[in-house]
Every structure is written in structure tokens, then in C-alpha cells.
Amino acid sequence: MRNFIWSFLAFFCLISASFSQTKNIEKGSYLSTNKGQKIKLNLLEDNKYELVFYSGDYEVKGDSLLFVPGTKSESAFDLAFKNDKKAKKVKVKFSDAVYYYSFYIGTQKGPEDIQYQRLSDIREKVNPEGDKLDVDFEIERADYLYLVYEEYGGKSRVSKFALPKEVSEIAIKYQPEVLGDLNIKGFFDQKTSELMISEQSGKDPLVFRNAKDKQPEKVSKVIPLENKIISDWNYPGKEPLVSEDFGLATDSTAVAVDSYAPAFDFKLKIENDLKSAISSNKIARNKFLAVVVDNKNPSAKADFDAAIKDQESQMSYTMYDAYHPEYDLYNYYLTTENDKKWLKSNKITDSPSIVILNNNGEILATAKSNFKDKQYQFNYYDGLYKKLQRTDGLLDFNKTMKNKKASDADLIQAFNKVAVLEIPYDYETDYTVTTDDNAAEFKFANVTLDKKEIAQVWKKLIEAHQKDTKPNMYLVETILKEIKNQGFSKQFFKDDKVLNDTDFLAIDYLIKHYDAIDAERAAFTAKEGETHVIGSLNTEIATALQQNTYVVENNTPAAKGDSKTISVYKKLIAAGKGNFECYQNYFTYLAEVQDRDGSNTNYLKEFSTYFNANLAADKGSVIEKLDTMFTSIDPNSEYSYNGWNAFKEYHSNLCNEASWTVVSKPGNTGFIKSAITWSEYSLVVSKNNPYYLDTLAQLYYKDGQKEKAITTQTLAVKYLTDYVEEETATDIRETLSKMQNGTY
């Protein structure tokens, strides 16, 4: 019945908003300007809109899809620092601290124990009258600041911040990110060209600017080194949390306490000369070398050693129980008098400076800063490492492209090195060039690439390997990344990928070698010293095709890619590789592509094949057959997470959607008999559904079974509930009346 969507769309919220009507509101994208917010408003055609609240990255590990927040290590605590090296203590201002008993503040010097205080205790000392919302107090100088919000239910939000060496003032504000049911309205300010969205109260509006207009300058935000959610968070001497019923909670000292004390003592290997440092880094493969230049500082060696010791301490906390190479990202070296020639040849004249090299000793990035001030960026949680990986990949690719002696294998490796990189959340930023006037910020090596030349080289590679007798797994992985809009094109040019002739030829390569790839992918992904991810090919290809439809969504149904996309699905199905995920995406695609006569013949034919092969009741129990299918699907798919009921509802709704296509379009009348079978199936899986009953009744009527149609439509009216939209309920009742009086 009429595009009735079940629980597989339960992830989305429906938000109703009314906007002030003004001729100056343009269709397009608007970006919020509020501090701490990352919200996009899309005003689409046909008076549709989108509010995009969350975005981020994802990683594919085996058959798993892992989502990563768009901004790593942010917290609900908003901090601002002021520096004054003459200040003996640090002034702290905690603004608008309404829930005093829920907040804790901790300080830590190096690896020493964390010293915690409850904010309410501090407030009683500095403001015994309790007449101020803000809490102003002082703390001793420290290296790290811990801010904790203790929630009811036993979990606490713990954020750890690195304090600048010369910090004199800290401003703290707690800004929880809470999104509930919204009752909002909008107003367009013609003077400022800003669109403001707020709740009915009109307070604290979200302010958006058109994405095409110049955006306000970004305000630097202090990022914590790490965030944790800790159950039963505690520290020595901490009072128990007051429970929701205002009684005292169980004595927390009787509960096991999360400890920050590492069990693993990590040590960095620091070489005595630059040649050895570069050589050692070359062996490390996945690490970069940070060269610290501080030759004008008399205490450079002592400062460097102290920073290294602190780095080792932090690495020990990160690894905690044993050595984990994924956290060991950098080697370090302090230049000496013997390195003057190297510094001069590389035009490094500023001191202090930090120079970061790749495995080949090539300079990737430089910053005019001492090591201590930049030390926080050399950890697993900061985005610096990913930026360096991308710069390194671009340099290596550019060098390979210019090498006339480069073999096919060299080119594939160069493409693969870039394609497998994780796309950072702010990938739209050009890391290779910076216009930042702050010399202390890292500036990355600049690489200019020719888009047309790269496309030609990639095309020749794909064409040259069409006759391969066995698959090149590095090429396979690169193809998969490229067709999923995550590969070298995205890394190089940041454009959304639209599948072209070369991509469809590359997909043919995957299908041709499907079984061989499937046999080799486990060994390939487990290759020692390398990181590879190749999932099930049918799911990977189907996902790529589905993503491509979103990229070209503004094209007409007769767009160039339609026939090629359908051809790929048919090849997969003909090869016996049409798994559930493949068919799921295929049906979604076909349902949106009408035939020239306005019918959906192609879609209905394909669905009929799927139904007869997998769902038809004459092949056994309907529920047992679905259960067999459910146990065979990808354990990491959305239906594995949502469960058996969601899987059943998907298929009952799918059958109803196909059946309703026959009801609603005269060009599909040749499928009425089949549609009756599909519709009856939907009601076996989901009994007494008024939408499905309405569909079946209308099919019966069109098939000449008028009495059966009226009986079924009467049931549809009987089982109407408050959950059925009023307009739809009215249509169902009117349809029954028309059937009864012969005007249907």
C-alpha cells in the first residue's frame, strides 16, 4: 500500500519546521555558524528539506562496517586558554555550572596521581553564599586537566586535556549535545543573509549561512587528548553519588576502580645521529620520523629528553597492557652540530622547528615550533598522522607517475597506497597547501596532479589486466575502494565519484575473477606487516552501485549509467552471486527506474524471479524459508543488528511494494496474478495489516474477484488503527464504498 515503509527506516527522525516565507530564501545548502555545532540544512526541490545533524568517517574491517565520529576527541566541555608565563597559579572560571554535584575537576603533573575535587566543594569554599552560577577558583600549575560529568546510571564522561606550559587562565563551559523531539521554526535575516532556526521559545537559535556564501572565520577549539565513558568512575576519597531516589548509592570504594596506571612500560629508541634515525625509520615502514631542530636553546637536550619521557609515559597509558604497534606512529630525533649540512641543503633555517620525514627521508611537513608545544599532535588520537599518510601517498604517487621506467606493478602499488588511506573527517581541507599565517602550524609538502593524466593511466591499467588468468589482489582492493567513492580519486581531488566506463570495466574484472578473489581475500587481508580490507564481493559491488545512484540522483531515469548498472546486477545474479544484500539494492534501484511506457516491467520481472526462487510458499513453510535466509545473511548487515522481526518485515513490505506497483500503474496489468500471490504472501508474514489488505483487495477486484475483494477491503477497514495516516485511512474507506456501489 502506497509506499508504506516499515522499521528499516526507523533510524530517521521526522522533524516538522515552518520557515518564514521570503523571496530571498534560495534553494541549496546552509551551514550552521554556532560554536560547537556541525549541522547542515539542505533546501531541496519540491519544498523538501534535510537537517543533517551527524556525519563522520567509517572503516571497513573484513565484513564489518565501523562508524567513527566526524570530530575525534571532542567533548561536551568547551575550553579556552590564556597564557602568561609570569602567573604563579592558574585561574579557572567554570560558567553556568547548574548541576554542581555532577562535576569533578582533576589535575595531574606528569605521571603522578590525578588529584580530583568535586565542583560543589570548590563552590562552597569560594562562594559560600551560593549566589553565583559561575565558579571562579585557582589551581596549581599542572600538565593535564581532567573534567568529569557523573551521570545517573553509573556512567561518567571523562575528558582529559593537555594544558599549555604557560597557561594562566582557563574558561570552562559544559555544552552537552542533546537532540530530542524538536518543535522548531525558521527566520531569514535579509540584512545578514542568515537563516535562523529555533524552538518555539525563540531562544538560542541555530544560525545558518548559504554554503555558497563566505563563512565566518573558524574559532580554534581546544581538543582533549582523550574522552572516556567509565562505569562507576571513582578516585581515592571520592564520596558516593546520590541516587535518583535521593538515597546514598552503594559505597563506591567497594567497587573495582578503573585505574590509569599502565601495566606496560613503553620505551622509544632514540638514535644518536640523523643517518641512523632515517635508516631506522625506513625499517619501521608505517612510522614517520619527527626531527626536532632546537640548536639555539641551551637546554634543548634536556627539554627533548623530558618531552620524550612524557611521550613514553603517554604511550604506556595508550598501550596499557602490552605493545600495540598501531599506536606506535613516530620515531624522534634531535639535531646536533653534525646536521648543519643536512639542514642547509633542505633550507631549514628556523630554530626551533619540527621536520617530519617519510621512510625515504623526504620532508612531508614542517612547523616553526618547539617540540613541547606540538607534542599533543603526536598521538594516536590526533589527525596529524592521517594528514602525513595522505601527503606521503601523494608524493609517492607523483614520483611513480613521473618515472618512465615504472612498471605496471609499481603503478598499481602507487594507486593502492593512496586508495587504502582512511579519508579524514575534514578531507575537504587541502593538507598540502596552507594559507595559515601562523608559522607554528604544520605546513605540508605540495603536490600538483593532473586529473586527466591519472584517469588515462588508470584506464590503461584496467584494460591491460582484462586478460589476467588470476587476480592481482592489490588491483582488486584499489578497484573496490575506487568504485565505493573511497579511493584515489577521492583522495586526490575530493570529488564525489560517478561511475564511468573504466569503473564498469573494472567491475567486470572483479566478477570475472570472483571465485579466485574470494579464495584469496582471507590470506590477503591477513598479510603480515600490511593492512588490507576486502569484504564479500557481491555486497561490496552492490554497495558501490547503490552509492552511485545517490551521486547521480539529479539525473533522469534514462541516465547513461542505468543500463550499465542493471547489467552488473544481472551478471552477479547470473553467476549465482546474487545474495540478499545484492537483491536488496537491486530492487531499490529498479523501483526508481521506470520503463518508457511508465510501467515497471523490468523491476517486476526481476522481483518475480527472486520471489519464485526464495520465497514462494509451494517450496515449504514461509517462516522456515525466511529463517534459513536470515541465518545466511552477512552477520554485520543492518538486519543482523535489527533482528529477525526487521528481516521479516522487510520481505513482507517488499512483496507489498511490488504488488502495489501493479495496482497503481496500468502498464503492469500483466502481473496481476503474480501480484496476488505476492500480496497474499505479505499477509502470511504480517497478518491483518490494513495496508497489505487494501493492496490485496484491489488486486482481487482488478482480477474480477469482486466479492473476495469487498470481503478483504472490509477487513482492511476493520484493522485500521490510529497509527494509519488519516488520509490513507480515508482512502481505504472510500475504496470499500466504491467497490460496494460498483464505482471502483
Image: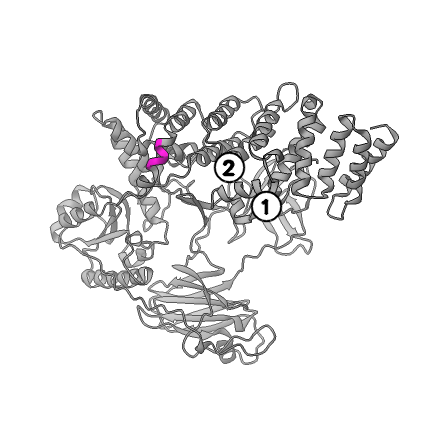
Q: Quadrant of the C terminus?
A: top right
In the rendered structure, which amino acid carries the disc numbered 2?
Answer: Glu
Relative to 326, 741 lies left or right = right
Instruction: In the displayed orientation, state which residue is furthest to the top.
Output: 597
SS at circle 2: helix
Q: Which residues are magenta?
A: 516-520
Q: Amino acid at mark 1?
A: Ala
Alpha carbons under labels 2 and 1: distance apart: 14 Å
The way the protein has been coloured in the rendering is one colour
Image disc number at residue 590: none
Q: Residue 428, percent across and down? A: 43, 40
At x 54%, y 31%, the residue is 586
Foreground residue among 13 and 587:
587
Residue 439 forms part of the magenta stretch: no
Q: Quadrant of residue 533?
A: top left
Measuring from the top left, give residue 304's x and y in whole percent.
22, 60
Q: Earlier in the sequence, mark 2 or mark 1?
A: 2
The residue that mark 2 highlights is 581
Residue 646's disc number: 1
- Residue at 57% across / 45% down in the picture? 208
